[in-house]
């Protein structure tokens, strides 16, 4: 049987580390709706949300190349 997808949540600090950004940058992404925390907890994120944010950052990087 295949292993279930990782369900571990991440804090703002962990998200910043994973995306290679500062916590202030993560806060700005949240303010503009590019990064959404779990409902009911403004400082915890699902792994799938981090993947989505990483794709946004990658598109942004490609746009300025």
Image: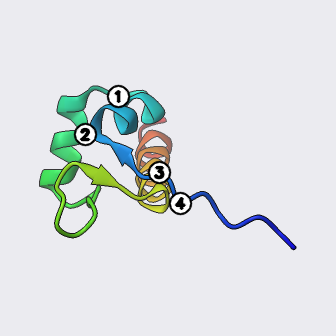
Q: Label 3: which residue? A: 59
Q: Residue 2, percent across and down? A: 83, 69
Left or right: residue 1 versus residue 21 is right
Q: Label 2: which residue? A: 26
Does the residue at mark 1 contact the one at mark 3 (Cβ under 8 Å)? no
Q: CA distance from mark 2 to mark 4?
A: 21 Å
N-terminal of the pair, mark 3 or mark 4, is: 4
Neighbour class for label 1 at 10 Å: few (<14), some, many (≥20)? few
Q: CA distance from mark 1 to mark 2?
A: 7 Å
N-terminal of the pair, mark 1 or mark 3, is: 1
Neighbour class for label 2 at 10 Å: few (<14), some, many (≥20)? some
- Which residue is pictured at 34% across the width and 54% down the height? 45
Q: Secondary structure at mark 2?
A: helix
- Which residue is pictured at 69% across the width and 67% down the height? 4
Q: CA distance from mark 3 to mark 4?
A: 25 Å
- Which residue is pictured at 17% across the width and 31% down the height? 24
Q: Label 4: which residue? A: 7
Q: Secondary structure at mark 1?
A: loop
């Amino acid at each position: 049987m295949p292993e279930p997808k990782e369900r571990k949540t991440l804090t703002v600090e962990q998200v910043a580390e994973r995306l290679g950004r500062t916590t202030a940058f993560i806060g700005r992404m949240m303010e503009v709706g590019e990064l959404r925390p779990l409902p009911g907890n403004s400082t915890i994120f699902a792994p799938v949300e981090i993947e989505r944010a990483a794709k946004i950052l990658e598109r942004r990087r490609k746009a300025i190349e």
